[in-house]
Amino acid sequence: MNYRHFVYLASALLSCHPALADTNPHRYTLEQAIDYALNNNPELGQQQARIEQADAQLGESLAAFYPQIQASLSYQHSDNPAQAFAMIIAQRRLNFNGGDFNHPGGVDDYRPEVTASYALFRGGQDYYRQQAAQLGVETAELDKVATRHQLINHVTAAYYGYWAAQDAHTLSLRSIAAVDSELKQSRLRFDAGTVLKSDVLSLEVQLAEAREAEIQTANGIELATAMLKTLLGLPASEDLQVADGDAATLPPSPESFETLLDQALSHHPSLQAAAKRVEIAERQLEIAKAAHLPKADAFVSYGSNSQDLAFSSNRDNVSAGVSVTVDVFSGFATQEKIKHAEHAVTAAREAARQARLQLEQQLKMARLKLLEALQRQQVSVTAVQAAEEALRLVAAQRDAGVVTVTRYLEAEVARDKAQTRAISARYDALRAEADLKQATGVWN
């Protein structure tokens, strides 16, 4: 019997992503596998780190709304008359009756100082930067939700892919046993002269094909297990057992495309994240435009000047003031930054539009695949019943010597193919349901 078609289909189903384990062997249900992956998959850990990075960036942007305080200590030594005279005055040591102002000698000056500054106005740059940072946190959170949905979908696909390979392997073992039994009987009949040599050779070819299919499906089980372990963030050396996938019920027929699209537009995290990125780009554009506006800063400093580090309130001083600056000409740098930000807004809007188009396509494909799989499953149930009945009748005719071995093999191959199609349709429907949930962004 030839199972190449089904093995290819099962391999495609399994290739979605990797998989699962535990130090103590435990039979994981689908729900347990998903929960474990959500708690242990490194990709979600990366997304959480990005959220925390965005949150730290938000805190950094809020720092602009607080006063900035700095402490400093400076030292000078000079014999320049002007500088030395200024240092003597700052130290409150000026004496008109002593010393030569033209030759003051070397003068030491120590100045400990505390300075506080506050941005009074920056054209709204700090405000827009804080808004962009807040949107960045929200975008990172939405990206994590999208990653969670994708991970759930991949675990679901790998889980049912594992059982698709298991069922294919069971069919191949049953085929080996059936063909091997028939081959032994045919050899006896050939020795008795009641069966042609060609019938025996046909059975030998059929047995070789069944054994080849068994090797492929056994390998498919190993690949599916490795995929599940990777998805759950577990080492390949750990043991894994998966609970029976037959307990899953077939999904219902999907709602209309328009209804599903409305759900996706309202709930899908990737679309919401794309919209947030447009808002971030718009805030960055406002920041660039604000560079044309004046900036005002207030400052106050307190310190003292002395020949040594000894502090005295008799030598302290306070300075305070306000400064206003405006960029008159920056070599066209401000204009170019504005152009850059405008193009970034356009790119973000196009990316959001592309995300919607891709989502619509993904949604339509998932819905059609689910409908197709459900219809195939209904047809395959009838086909399996008919094929099994046909095989029973041909087997009876074969025992009576009415039909040849070739006809019996044809009936058996038809039965096994019908069962293969039924298995494929069942797991395709379950997989398509997961795709549809990811496309709508709604997981019950």
Image (tube, rainbow, N blue to C red):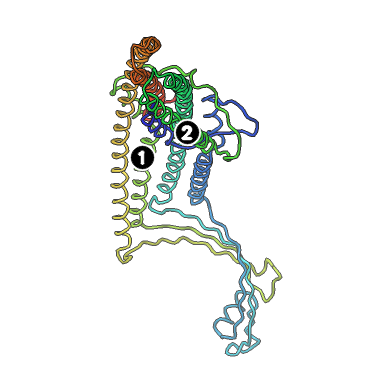
Q: Earlier in the sequence, mark 2 or mark 1?
A: 2
What kind of element bears circle 2? helix
Residue 195 shows which numbered tag?
A: none
For this rendering, which residue is in front, 43 or 239? 239
At 32% from the left edge and 16% from the top edge, which residue is drawn? 379
The part of the image, by quadrant, that contains residue 97 is bottom right
Vertically, is 124 above or below 92? above
Q: Position of residue 297 (x, y in %)?
A: 46, 58
Of residues 335 and 123, the one drawn nearer to the viewer in this rendering: 335
- Choose top left, top right, bottom left or bottom right for residue 95: bottom right
Residue 86 horizontal/vertical position (percent): 57, 78
Q: Which residue is mark 2?
A: 215
Q: In the rendered image, which quarter contains the C terminus?
A: top left
Can residue 149 be seen at all in this image of the molecule?
A: no
Q: CA distance from mark 2 to mark 1?
A: 46 Å
- The residue labelled by disc 1 is 274
Tell which tag, 2 or 1, sits nearer the viewer.
Answer: 2
Q: Is residue 325 visible?
A: yes
Percent across and percent down for residue 84 are: 59, 82
Tell me where residue 318 appears, x and y as whole percent.
58, 64
Q: Residues within 10 Å of mark 2 (few under 14, many from 20)?
A: some
* Quadrant (top left/top right/bottom left/bottom right) for the N terminus: top left
- The residue at the point 48 percent across, 26 percent down is 166
Q: Is residue 217 above or below residue 348?
A: above
Q: Decide: is 12 above or below 110.
A: above
